[in-house]
Amino acid sequence: MTCRMVLKRMGWVVWGVLAAGVMWGIGGGVWAREGGEAAPRVVRPGATDDAPPSDAVVLFDGRDLSKWEHVGGGAAKWKVRDGQMIVVPGTGDIVTRQSYGSCQLHIEWMVPHEQGGSGQHVGNSGIKFQTQYEIQVLESHDHTTRPEGQAGAIYAQHPPLVNACRPPNVWQSYDIVFLAPKRDGSGKVVEPGRFTVFQNGVLIHHNAKILGKTGGAPPPRYHDHAPRMPLLLQDHGHAVRYRNIWLRQLGA
Ligand code: MG
């Protein structure tokens, strides 16, 4: 082998090493080393996609209301029967005993078949994150109301992207990602809250901006409250049922 051939072969080796280095960098080898990212925490999923995963807080498993109380304090007065909790109209809203910030919530609900109701007066209830921000529960399969007040609406702020409702007396689900509003040292909201919601597996809100407390006189505005607050289920005078409620806390 001549000296020239040796140099040529060495050239190919150098090019090969350089190319491998570039590929390794593109593939994340360099980034992964320098970033020092920890491996994602292991969460064991439930046996089915609606069953609570290993890191979930189970808020209602069909047995009792031990995780809940009346909004004004004292025992929650809703009924528990056949693995369901049922609104007893007139007994008041109920809230979780614990408080939460950003979270992922799974909840199943069913509105009763009611004769003669209309608008907001058919199967009305609601899920209020931090007692402030409501995802509406309503009979919106057979009844119409204003879009920003129908089932799945971020109440009085955003209608759902589509109407994915099932009829009365049929179970439905919400899978909700709630990002709590962020505040500065003085309590001023510097980043609004956000909702992403699936109803019966269908996307009905994608990173929608929460404009403030839902309901009340418009325009919506944020009220002062603690970074963590209870989850509230609304007694709006209708015997709405809930079951299989679990939550995963997000963030620190
Ligand atoms: Mg409501």
Image (tube, rainbow, N blue to C red):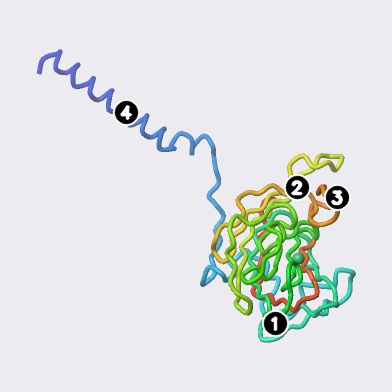
Left-right relation of 218 to 51: right
Mark 3, Cα crowd under 10 Å, few <14 / some 14-19 / many 20+, is few
Q: What residue is rendered at 57% in x and 55% in y?
A: 41
Q: Secondary structure at mark 1?
A: loop
Does the residue tagged 1 have its C-beta within 8 Å of any atom of ligand 1?
no
What amino acid does circle 3 point to?
A: His
Instruction: Return the residue at label 4.
Output: 19
Instruction: Return the residue at label 1.
Output: 63
Q: Are marks 1 and 2 in contact (CB under 8 Å)?
A: no
Q: What residue is rendered at 53% in x and 65% in y?
A: 45
Q: In the image, which disc is placed on residue 192?
A: none
View extreme (bottom): residue = 82
Q: What residue is rendered at 63% in x and 66% in y?
A: 106
**163 versus 220 height, above or below:** below
The Cα atoms of the two marked residues, 1 and 4, are separated by: 62 Å
| Towards the viewer: 38 or 58 | 58
Q: What residue is rendered at 70% in x and 80% in y?
A: 114
Q: Secondary structure at mark 2?
A: loop
**Can you tell which of label 1 and label 4 is closer to the viewer?**
1
What amino acid does circle 2 point to?
A: Leu
The Cα atoms of the two marked residues, 1 and 2, are separated by: 36 Å
The Cα atoms of the two marked residues, 4 and 3, are separated by: 57 Å
Mark 1, Cα crowd under 10 Å, few <14 / some 14-19 / many 20+, is few
In the rendered image, residue 35, in percent from the top left (x then y), is placed at 54, 37
Q: In the image, which disc is placed on residue 211?
A: 2
Dot 4 or dot 2: first in sequence order is 4
What amino acid does circle 1 point to?
A: Arg
Does the residue tagged 2 have its C-beta within 8 Å of any atom of ligand 1?
no
